[in-house]
Image (cartoon, rainbow, N blue to C red):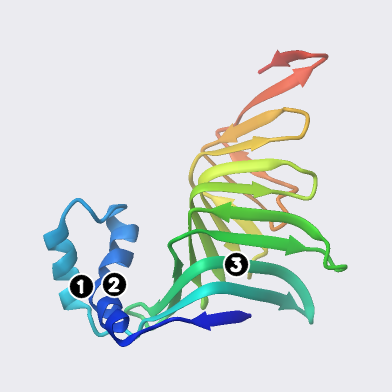
Amino acid sequence: MINKPFMQQGQVKYLKLYLPAIVMCLFLFGACENDLNKVRAIAAADSTKDISQTVGVEMLFSDSAIVKLKLTAPLSISYKDKKKQPITLMPHGVKVVFYDVDIKQIGNIVADTGIQRETEKLIIFRKNVVATNPEGTVYKSEELIYDQGKKQIYSTKNVLMTKVGGDQMTGTSFVSDDKLLHPIFQNATAVIHVDNSIAQ
């Protein structure tokens, strides 16, 4: 893991004052511009959290001394929630690359924002999420959740899967193995190309 600390005294004060509000807005309201007074009230009530910021984040995750994935993000902001569980917010984008035993890239996930819940072994990808599996199949959604403990990737949001040949499947939610090779969709519809024609 390569961390490049970047924190000045004034920025620490700023983060302690406003970051909890930003995080709570992301979880509860989706956007913070709508009610500045509400944001300030939340920040003032929760300004004592231990918060740290890191730029140029690169983290390697391994299993039995074998590198399984690499996470990169331009910025991460870490804090603990009310249950003292460590949470890392990546508000400016996140990318995860998956590797096989030979350290060969076999897939990736990119998103506009990311949240790592360390204790629960979850990485949550939100907004414009695009994931690619070893076969080149692409998944798109507004949210994907990677459960490292269960070795699953799932979503409770609409998901569009597009295979290399153009076949597509959509569902209101789905669950798959952590390589995205065996997905199970709920309320699925499909577009299948047969002899240059399309069947639904």
- To which quarter of the image does residue 10 belong? bottom left
Decide which of tag 3 and tag 1 comes sooner along the chain: 1
**Along the line of sight, which residue is nearer the eye, 128 or 161?**
128
Looking at the picture, tell me which residue is in the foreground, 105 or 11.
11
Q: Where is residue 96, by image quadrant?
A: bottom right
> In the picture, residue 174 is in which quadrant?
top right
Residue 112 position in % (x across, y down): 48, 53
Residue at the spot of label 2 = 20
Nearest the eye: 140 or 58: 58
Residue annotated with mark 1: 43
Residue 163, compared with residue 81, is above or below; it is above
**How far across and down, in percent of the image, does residue 154 sit?**
58, 52
x, y percent for residue 30: 31, 52
Q: Secondary structure at mark 3?
A: strand
**Separation (CA) of disc 1 from disc 2:** 6 Å
The amino acid sitting under disc 1 is Ala
Q: Residue at x 72, y 76 (%)?
A: 62
> Crowding at label 2, few (<14), some or many (≥20) Cα neighbours within 10 Å?
many
Work out whether 93 lies above or below 195: below
- In the image: residue 105, left or right of residue 187: right
Residue of label 3: 72
Q: Earlier in the sequence, mark 1 or mark 2?
A: 2
Indicate the quadrant containing the N terminus: top left, top right, bottom left or bottom right.
bottom right
Three-letter amino acid code of the residue under disc 3: Thr
Task: Find residue 103 and report its horizontal and vertical position in percent.
Answer: 83, 67
Q: Are marks 1 and 2 in contact (CB under 8 Å)?
A: yes
